[in-house]
Amino acid sequence: KVQGREYMAKVLADLEGKDITLTIEEYSKEKRTTYQNKWYWSVVRQVSNALNDIGYRMTEAETHAYLGSMFLTKVIDNPIQKGNIVIIRSTTSLGVKEFSQYMEDILRFSAENLDLVIEHPSDWLMKKYI
């Protein structure tokens, strides 16, 4: 359902005669922000370094896949081969709420298994400005 038809008509009228690029796509769910994405890859880097420090040799891309295999798996029935299929969801498919839970899982794992305490950005900002 298209909402705000009158507003859209006004916006388009204001753009008349201008060269523009307009992208229209079906609304899905709110995606994570660029800021969240940068923080995620910072966390992946820290986890990768910690794993390397204890003898695992993983690149950041491999660490990203490893974390996904631990926290983003979904098991579905495979009726053709009579068993289960394990699917690892892509982080890009996560909405903000799901992504926040994924990050909490990684932070907990890092603290409990790698003795790696990763500060949440909000903690760092509180220290900086208070």
Image (cartoon, grey):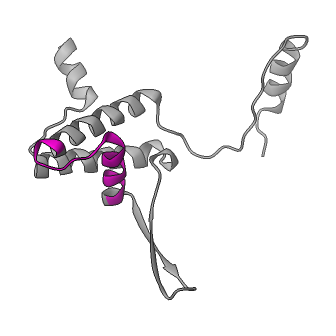
Residue 37 picture location, percent across and down: 41, 33
| Total labels drawn | 0
Where, quadrant-wise, is the C terminus in this rendering? top left
Q: Which segment is the magenta one?
A: 52-69
Q: Quadrant of residue 46?
A: top left
43 w.r.t. 9: above or below? below
124 w.r.t. 118: above or below? above
Residue 56 picture location, percent across and down: 18, 50
Relative to residue 1, is residue 45 drawn left or right? left
Report the front residue among 18 and 7: 18
Residue for point 36% across, 54% down: 68
Q: Is residue 4 magenta?
A: no
Residue for point 57% across, 45% down: 29
Residue 43 picture location, percent across and down: 27, 36
6 w.r.t. 68: above or below? above
Residue lying furthest right in this view? Answer: 17
Residue for point 78% across, 22% down: 21
Report the front residue among 107 and 79: 79
Residue 103 picture location, percent across and down: 31, 44
Report the front residue among 100 and 65: 65
Residue lying furthest bottom in this view? Answer: 82
Q: Is residue 61 magenta?
A: yes
25 w.r.t. 87: above or below? above
Prevailing secondary structure class for the magenta stretch in the rendered image: helix
Q: Quadrant of residue 40?
A: top left
Relative to residue 4, is residue 120 drawn left or right? left
Q: Quadrant of residue 41?
A: top left
